[in-house]
C-alpha cells in the first residue's frame, strides 16, 4: 500500500499541473487612418503555457449586439494561426469595403491556444446547494392574478443572475389580458460563429394555489445553475438562456418569443427546455404513462414496464426534426452522467398526435421548425403533487435534479463547442468622436469630482423608474478599461464608481440602458 502513495501523488500532481490556462489578449491602442481607410490595432498577447495562438478579429455594426468575423484577406500583420505571445503585436484592417462608417463599428479581438476544454470539469461544478438556494428564493405562489409581486421578484432574480454572469441581458415584453408580461433573455455570445445558437430555457410562473416547486421552480433552479457554470467558459457558438413567462396560461411567453423574439442574426440549432426536473421515486408502480403512449412508443413504454414502472428516470422528448438533438442529449448523458437513467421518445411531425407531449415551451419551437427537447420528470404521470398546494421543496430529489442539470449542461456545452479563448474589445466611436452616444438616456447624469483621483460619484437625477444600467469606461484610444452593471433608483440617486486603478489621463464613461446611452468625459489626475 505504501508503494502506491508516491504513484497516486505523482498522478495527482501531473493532472493538476496539466490544467491549461486560456491566453490573455489585450488591445493597447487603436488608430484610424481615415484617408487610407486602415484601422491599426496594437495588442499584447500572453499565454501562461507560452502556446502559439490563433488570433481573429470580429466587428459589430449594431452597437455590439452581434459580431461577425472579418476576413483575414483584408487584414495584414499578426493575425491568423501560430501567433506567438508578445506584448507588441499589431494588425492592420483595410476597411475600405465596409458600407458603415468606421466610427459606428465595434471590434472584438480574439485569441485561442487551441487547447481542449474539459466538459467534465463543468459538469463537476453542478451543486445541490446552489439548486436549493435558488429553489428557496423561487418557490411560492407566483402568477399574474393572485401573486404578481412574487412573480416580479422571480423575474428580477433571473435578470440579476443573468447580469451577474455577464450575459448580454434583455427582456421581451408582451401583452396578455391587458397585462404586460416579460420573458427574460441572457446571451453568451460565441467566439466564432455566434449566429449558431443553442437555447436552455424554463418557465418561471406557477399556477394559483401552488408553491410550484417542481412546476416549475425546479426548472428555474436548473436554468440558473446552467448559467452560473457555462458563463465561466467561452464557446465557438452562442448559448442563450431564457426564462419564459406565462407558460401556465397556454405557452404564451414562448409563443411570443418564437414569433417576435428571435433576433435576425440567430440561427437556432437546438432548444433544451427544462419542464419539471425534480421529482423522483424508486418505488414500484410510481410511474404512469399517457393514454396511447404504449402504442406510439412501444420501446420507451417497455423500458418503464421492465423496471416495474418506477419513476426513477428523466424523460427527454423530441420530435422528428429534433432527432439529432435527442441523440446529442443521450450521448452527453451516457458520457458525463452514466448514473442518470434516461428514457426518450420522438414524436412524428409537430407532436399533435400526442397532445400530452406538447404541454411546455418546446412546442412553439417545434411549430417553428426548430429542434427542441422537453426534459421532464413527466409531471402528473409521476408527481401527485402537480398543480397542488403540496408541490413543495421537501418533495423534490436534489440529487436527481443535479444529474439532470449535468446532462443538459453537458449537451449544450458539447454542441456549442468549448474553446480556450479570450477577447478584448474597442468601441471605435471613442477613437474618432464621442458624439452619437447620447440617445435619450432616461435621466440626467453627471460625475463628480472631475478631475478626481479615480474615486467618482455618479449622480443621477429625475429618473422616472428604477432601471439597470451598464457602465463602460474607455480611454481615448478606444480601449475599454472598466465595465460594471449598476442599479439606478427612481428619482435621485448616487453610485460610487471606483476607477482608482486607471492611470492619469482623460477617459469617457458611457452609460447604457437598453437602447439609450449617455457619454460623460472625465479626467483622472495626480
Image (spheres, grey):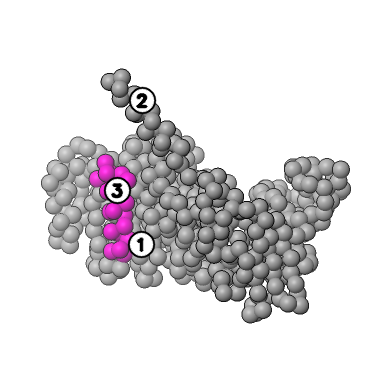
Say which residue label 2 marks: 6
Q: Is mark 3 on a helix, strand or loop?
A: helix
Extent of the magenta region: 322-341
Q: Is mark 1 on a helix, strand or loop?
A: strand
For the residues bearing labels 3 and 2, Cβ distance under 8 angstroms: no
Point out residue 321 in the picture as x, y percentages from the top left corner. Answer: 30, 68
Task: Let me know if residue 462 appears in the view.
Answer: no
CA–CA distance in space, label 3 to label 1: 21 Å
Quadrant in the picture for the C terminus: top right
55 is within the stretch colored magenta:
no
Point out residue 288 in the picture as x, y percentages from the top left corner. Answer: 20, 48
Say which residue label 3 marks: 335
Magenta segment, principal secondary structure? Answer: helix
Mark 3 vs mark 2, foreground winner is 2
Q: Which residue is drawn at 48% across and 65% down?
A: 193
Task: Point out the tag, 3 or 2, that comes first from the N-terminus.
Answer: 2
Q: Is residue 373 above or below residue 97?
A: above
Point out residue 215 in the picture as x, y percentages from the top left corner. Answer: 38, 47
Mark 3 vs mark 1, foreground winner is 3
Q: In this view, does 349 lie above or below 333?
A: below
Q: In this view, does 473 lie to the left or right of 263?
A: right
Amino acid at each position: 500500500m505504501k508503494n502506491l502513495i508516491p504513484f497516486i501523488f505523482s498522478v495527482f500532481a501531473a493532472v493538476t499541473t496539466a490544467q491549461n490556462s486560456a491566453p490573455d489578449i489585450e488591445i493597447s491602442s487603436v488608430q484610424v487612418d481615415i484617408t487610407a481607410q486602415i484601422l491599426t490595432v496594437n495588442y499584447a498577447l500572453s499565454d501562461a503555457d507560452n502556446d502559439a495562438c490563433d488570433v481573429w478579429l470580429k466587428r459589430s455594426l449594431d452597437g455590439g449586439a452581434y459580431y461577425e468575423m472579418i476576413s483575414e484577406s483584408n487584414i495584414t500583420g499578426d493575425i491568423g494561426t501560430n501567433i506567438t505571445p508578445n506584448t507588441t503585436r499589431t494588425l492592420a484592417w483595410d476597411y475600405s469595403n465596409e458600407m458603415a462608417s468606421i466610427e459606428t463599428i465595434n471590434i472584438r479581438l480574439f485569441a485561442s491556444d487551441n487547447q481542449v476544454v474539459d466538459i467534465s470539469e463543468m459538469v463537476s461544478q453542478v451543486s445541490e446547494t446552489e439548486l436549493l438556494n435558488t429553489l428557496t428564493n423561487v418557490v411560492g405562489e407566483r402568477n399574474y392574478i393572485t401573486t404578481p409581486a412574487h412573480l416580479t421578484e422571480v423575474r428580477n432574480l433571473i435578470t440579476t443572475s443573468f447580469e451577474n454572469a455577464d450575459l448580454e441581458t434583455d427582456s421581451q415584453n408582451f401583452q396578455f389580458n391587458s397585462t404586460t408580461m416579460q420573458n427574460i433573455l441572457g446571451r453568451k455570445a460565441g467566439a466564432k460563429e455566434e449566429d449558431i445558437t443553442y437555447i436552455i430555457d424554463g418557465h418561471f410562473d406557477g399556477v394559483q394555489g401552488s408553491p410550484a416547486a417542481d412546476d416549475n421552480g425546479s426548472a428555474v433552479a436548473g436554468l440558473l445553475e446552467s448559467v452560473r457554470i457555462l458563463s465561466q467558459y467561452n464557446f465557438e457558438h452562442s448559448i442563450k438562456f431564457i426564462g419564459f413567462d406565462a407558460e401556465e396560461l397556454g405557452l404564451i411567453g414562448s409563443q411570443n418569443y418564437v414569433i417576435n423574439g428571435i433576433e435576425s442574426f440567430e440561427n437556432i440549432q437546438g432548444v433544451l427546455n427544462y419542464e419539471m426536473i425534480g421529482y423522483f421515486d424508486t418505488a414500484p408502480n410510481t410511474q404512469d404513462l399517457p393514454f396511447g403512449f404504449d402504442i406510439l412508443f412501444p420501446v420507451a413504454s417497455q423500458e418503464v414496464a421492465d423496471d416495474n414502472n418506477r419513476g426513477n428516470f428523466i424523460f427527454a422528448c423530441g420530435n422528428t426534426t429534433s432527432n439529432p438533438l435527442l441523440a446529442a442529449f443521450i450521448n452527453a448523458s451516457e458520457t458525463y452522467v452514466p448514473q442518470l437513467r434516461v428514457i426518450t421518445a420522438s414524436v412524428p411531425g409537430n407532436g399533435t398526435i400526442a397532445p400530452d407531449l406538447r404541454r411546455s415551451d418546446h412546442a412553439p419551437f417545434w411549430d417553428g421548425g426548430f429542434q427542441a427537447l422537453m426534459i421532464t420528470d413527466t409531471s402528473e404521470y409521476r408527481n401527485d403533487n402537480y398543480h397542488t398546494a403540496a408541490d413543495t421543496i421537501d418533495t423534490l430529489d436534489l440529487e436527481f435534479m443535479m444529474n439532470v442539470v449535468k446532462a443538459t449542461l453537458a449537451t449544450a456545452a458539447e454542441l456549442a463547442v468549448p474553446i480556450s479563448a479570450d477577447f478584448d474589445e474597442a468601441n471605435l466611436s471613442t477613437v474618432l468622436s464621442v458624439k452619437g452616444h447620447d440617445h435619450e438616456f432616461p435621466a440626467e447624469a453627471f460625475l463628480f469630482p472631475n478631475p478626481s483621483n479615480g474615486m467618482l460619484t455618479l449622480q443621477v437625477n429625475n429618473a422616472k423608474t428604477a432601471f439597470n444600467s451598464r457602465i463602460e469606461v474607455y480611454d481615448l484610444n478606444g480601449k475599454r478599461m472598466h465595465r460594471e452593471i449598476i442599479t439606478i433608483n427612481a428619482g435621485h440617486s448616487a453610485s460610487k464608481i471606483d476607477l482608482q486603478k486607471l492611470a492619469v489621463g482623460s477617459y469617457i464613461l458611457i452609460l447604457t440602458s437598453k437602447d439609450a446611452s449617455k457619454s460623460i468625459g472625465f479626467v483622472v489626475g495626480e
